[in-house]
Amino acid sequence: MRARTIAICRMLTGIFFLFFGEYKVADGAFAHGGFQKYLADYISHDAASFYRPVLSRFVLPHAVPLGYCVGIIELLIAGSLLLGWHVRMFSVIGALYMINLALATWNAPGPGPVWRYFGNELDHLPLLFLFAIFFANRAGETWGMDGRISEARAPRE
């Protein structure tokens, strides 16, 4: 029962990522302006202080291709989660992506107690935890291609 519940959560999370990535890739508005707007906000006040130079020196100068890369990564995560294909690998990629987003938006609520920063990350931290669950439980093996690949590789008796 647990494995099936996790598989359902995996596939529903994949649907979210399908929506996240689709508009970024299909419509160039995100890569050609939207991403730069987000980056400007992150760099000016939202990002963790140690992460701002990474965004301003490495990401912003390459915003258009990286904007498309963001969408492609989200679509790859979506495909992985929906199909149950290489779920552990894409769970690591998804977790790193969520950590990146958390660092980029860490200071968004402004100055205040620490709980405000964690509250602001309710978009990113639960997804990070889901990726950890998918990784730890080999979520692609139930109702997914990972399970079929494992069965095909298993020695026949």
Image (cartoon, rainbow, N blue to C red):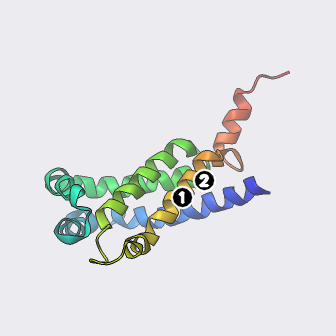
Q: The disc labelled 1 sits on which kind of residue?
A: Phe
The residue closer to the viewer here, 90 or 65, is 90
Nearest to the observer: residue 64 or residue 107: 107
Circle 1 residues within 10 Å: few <14, some 14–19, many ≥20 = some
Quadrant assignment for the C terminus: top right
The residue tagged 1 is: 129
Judged left or right of residue 154, residue 22 is: left
> Is residue 77 shown left or right of residue 46?
right
Q: How many marks?
A: 2
- Residue 25 visible in the picture: no
Secondary-structure class at tag 1: helix
Residue under pointer 2:
133
Q: Amino acid at mark 2?
A: Ile
Extreme-front residue of the structure: 113
Residue at image position (39%, 76%) is 116
- Where residue 143 sits in the image (x, y, percent)? 71, 50
| Label 2: element kind | helix
